Image (tube, rainbow, N blue to C red):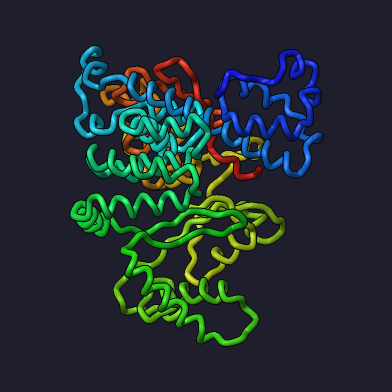
Amino acid sequence: MSSVLPQEGHVDAGLAQVGPLDEWVAWLREEGPGDVSAGLVGGLDVAGLSGRGLVDALVVLEAHLSWVQSKQVEVLAAIAERAETPEAVILAEGGRLDDVFAASWDTAVEEVACALRLANVTAAQRLKVARLLGGRHEATVGLLAEGRISYVQAQAVAEQLEVVDDEVAGQVEAVMVGKMPTQAAGQTRASLRREILRADPEGAELRHRQRVRERELLHYPKDDGMAVFGAVLPAQQAALMEQAVDSWAQGYGDDGRSLEQKRADALFELVVDQPGAVGGLRADAGSGRSAVVVQVTVPFDILLGAEDGPAELKGYGPVTGSQARELAFAPGSIWRRLLTEPETGLVVKADPTTYRPTAETQRHVIARDQYCAFPSCRMPAHRCDLDHIRPFDHRHPERGGPTVPDNLQPLCRRHHRLKTHHPGWAVSRDRHTGTATWTAPTGHRYTNTPPVYRE
């Protein structure tokens, strides 16, 4: 940013005295972000701006946001650089490093996730992008610091060029530096794909073949009892699927549904309501396939319709009482009773003290916690290990570490290994509130509380 500022004293006396406020904001937009202007924008009088001035102010704030994000990239890269070496930590404690855990040891992810209240995958993505930008994309970081591009564009550069070698990355970035300041984020992504294909056509073909092997289904929750269900698959297959869905939807005729409603219903029918489809209306009993298992946890009075309130759909989260009743009273539904503590709303249950939890104890802990007990992790509990918070004493079980719900928590394999092998991480659980408190190597503490079913 230029060192030339409006006359001294005018800003302190009030921004309006610098002349027309619109002109001052336009000047800030022209100058670009920096440590001096960052202090000035905090005193901006929005009410004194015209429509034109408001747009300029919006651009000024966005540029400063990019400038701050460039600083965050620098900090994240430093955190990643200082992450401890697993071999040194374990050997210093006289222990042996778990080979599988060593491959994914970087606990900077956990610290960042807890500190910023992010999901592990989001924290890992932030750290990875910071490493890539700091290590090989100085020109892109420069544009970000100048407020000429957004963080989303910088992120796209880091992630899309991660798969190519340094020489190709440098070639593509050199082209993109001249394009990105005038592009929207979507245009930048498309330009990156095009330039990568142009610079490395053979590599692009190899990477496509690998991604085909990694094809997968996607399923994640949306608001108001809705969810997204789809797949990551080759683009040409997606195009054919879209044509099939559109063709099926056209057969509905004019029945009052919108085109998008018809398309969504057509996809459901094509997948579920077909001969032999599991759970479908035309399911073939002789197909030999397993029955569908859908778990919903709901208070008894809501189940019976005496009250309205939320229920919990496994793998999704809160749903309405009507959705829960639709599942509960569907043909073939099986009910299992779980008790809740009236005062706290937590699921409660007493079980024998044995090393391996019984099936009933497993169901109880999974229903109680729903997800991995690490604060930033959203791995569903049914895919986790059941961990003894106080270690089980195999020689003298009566001395502690009992296999009861109060001493059990679901932990995904990564966080189970972290608790077991990492000397810097520790956890305790309040048996009255169910709150797990994790202490990080830096001394910071983070908490995780299981859901309360009567909230």
The spot of residue 207 in percent (x, y) is 23, 53
Q: Which residue is painted at 72% across and 17% down in the image?
A: 7
Quadrant in which residue 103 is drawn: top left
Relative to 55, 185 lies left or right: left
> In this rendering, does residue 364 appear at all?
no
Q: Is residue 302 left or right of residue 110?
A: right
Q: In the figure, is residue 284 to the left or right of 300? A: left
Viewer-proximal residue among 150 and 214: 150
Q: Quadrant of residue 320?
A: bottom right
Task: Tell me the quarter of the image containing the C terminus.
Answer: top right
In this rendering, the answer to whether 382 lies above or below 308 is above
Q: Residue at x 80, y 23 (%)?
A: 17
The mark tally for this picture is 0
Q: Position of residue 242 (x, y in %)?
A: 42, 73
Q: Does the rendering let one see residue 265?
A: yes
Residue 195, image x and y in percent?
32, 51
Residue at the spot 52% in from the left edge and 29% down from the top edge: 67
Image coordinates of residue 211 in percent, x first then y, are 27, 55
Pick the quarter of the image with the N terminus: top right
Q: Residue at x 41, y 57 (%)?
A: 218
Hey, which quadrant is residue 413 in on the image?
Answer: top left
Foreground pick, 443 / 317? 443
Q: Is residue 250 above or below residue 434?
A: below
Q: Is residue 88 above or below residue 409?
A: above
202 and 111: which one is in front? 202
